[in-house]
Image (cartoon, rainbow, N blue to C red):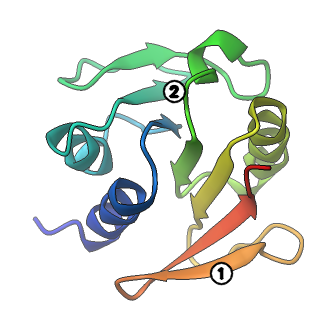
Amino acid sequence: MIYHIETAVGNYIRDHYTSAVEVGFGGKTVAAKILLEAGIPVLCTDVHTYNTDVPAVVDDCVEPDYSLYENADVIYAIRPGVEIVPALISLAQKMNCDLIVYHLGFELYMNGGERINADGVLLHRYVKKN
């Protein structure tokens, strides 16, 4: 199976950042593996436990363990529910890192942030590091 969206997100993060946390990964590791293969540290978080071959922990971005995000220069999420985006924005602002989101379908939060074309995949940067 081809994962064009996850691959495009992984490639974009790989090409623009040096450390990352993927929030709500749902056990899908395509993007994270691209980062790991490029030597970029990545941590995947989700509210559920997944048996996976990438670094992953249970965490809720609504009530996060901030220590998990300290070294990230980007937090990213692939298809998060739009109701989670405010918590992601708050988290990225608190950690002073970028927030990149690939939305499900045509969902957007507020104005959609800065739009980024990543190999034909539309990403939204809601927070840019100071």
Q: Left or right: 38 with respect to 45?
A: left
In the image: residue 8, left or right of residue 91: left
Q: Is residue 121 above or below residue 54?
A: below
For the view shown, which residue lies furthest in the right direction? 110
Q: Is residue 45 above or below residue 116?
A: above
Q: Residue at x 65, y 81 (%)?
A: 115
Badge 2: residue crowd in 10 Å (few <14, some 14–19, many ≥20): some
Is there any visible trace of residue 42 in the rendered image? yes
Tag in front: 2 or 1:
1
Mark linked to residue 92: none
Looking at the rendered structure, the secondary structure element under dot 2 is strand
The residue lying toward the viewer, choosing from 8 and 109, is: 8
Q: Residue furthest left?
A: 1
Query: Residue 86: where, in percent of width, then height?
Result: 85, 47
Q: Residue at x 42, y 43 (%)?
A: 18
Q: Earlier in the sequence, mark 2 or mark 1?
A: 2
Res. 12 image quadrant: bottom left
| Residue at (74% x, 57% y) in the render | 128
Residue 112 in the image: state x and y as whole percent: 78, 75
